[in-house]
Image (tube, grey):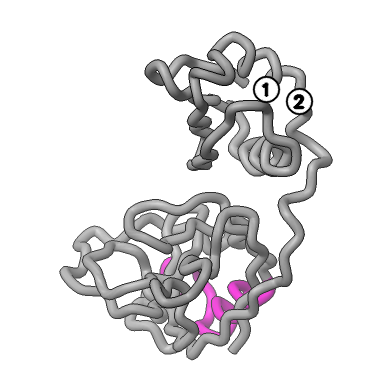
Amino acid sequence: MRVLPYGARAAMIDFDDPSEVLGLHASLEQDPPDGVIELVPAARTLLIRFDPGRTHHDRLAGDVLDRSTVDVAPREAAEIVVPVRYDGPDLADVAAATGMSAEAVVRRHEDGTYVSAFCGFAPGFAYLTGLDPALHLPRRTSPRTRVPAGSVAIAGEYTAVYPNASPGGWQLIGRTTLPVWDVEREPPNLLAPGTRIRFTS
């Protein structure tokens, strides 16, 4: 774990092991150091914004380096169950690429217990870890110009739900009517980092 300056008001924590990001994020959420304003987790980094009137980089770095990134549970939250109709346009291609039947792909996807590791690409687009390694596939060679909202997809080591219609290159295996992003809801993001998710037919 390395703590790097990120301008005068932030520090970037860089990890070799991406599984440590959520542990440190949970620790800092549960017991934030004085002056911390915002935590922004990503795949292998954690950005910490702070008030320079209340703390400074060296003090924050000392606090962070004293923390354990293991055995810290993400914030307590009810598991989100996402109902899926597994009829995505790429399901047959995923089955062929993995050497499984479409039914086996669906079972493997449903059997996973997922955690929202970070959000990016678009508001509410959560990168969910926990995908069965047998389903780790690259993005499509030709991205779509429009992926419908609610599309359930896989790419690399992640699975996701497209929160809104947008371009995208992930493999689409199903769809859900559950709104994972709603600006009229508080909070608008249903799959915030640390949330546990399960998919079911």
Q: Secondary structure at mark 2?
A: loop
- The answer to which image quadrant residue 155 occupies is bottom left
Residue 104 on image: x %, y %? 59, 80
Which residue is most to the left? 145
| The magenta segment | 95-111
Q: Amino acid at mark 1?
A: Val
Residue 9 on image: x %, y %? 43, 22
Residue 181 on image: x %, y %? 43, 72
Circle number at residue 67:
2
Q: Nearer the viewer, residue 116 or 179?
A: 179
Circle number at residue 64:
1
Left or right relative to 45: residue 96: left
Circle number at residue 111:
none
Residue 82 on image: x %, y %? 58, 80
- The answer to which image quadrant residue 60 occupies is top right
Instruction: Say which residue appears at 58% left-offset and 31% top-offset.
Output: 36
Instruction: Say which residue appears at 57% left-offset and 54% top-offset.
Output: 193
Instruction: Say which residue appears at 49% left-offset and 66% top-offset.
Output: 189
Main SS of the magenta part reads helix
Q: Are marks 2 and 1 in contact (CB under 8 Å)?
A: yes
* Relative to 63, residue 20 above or below: below
Q: Secondary structure at mark 1?
A: helix
Which residue is most to the top? 58
Which residue is most to the front? 53
Residue 198 included in the magenta stretch of the image: no
Q: Nearer the viewer, residue 52 or 4?
A: 52
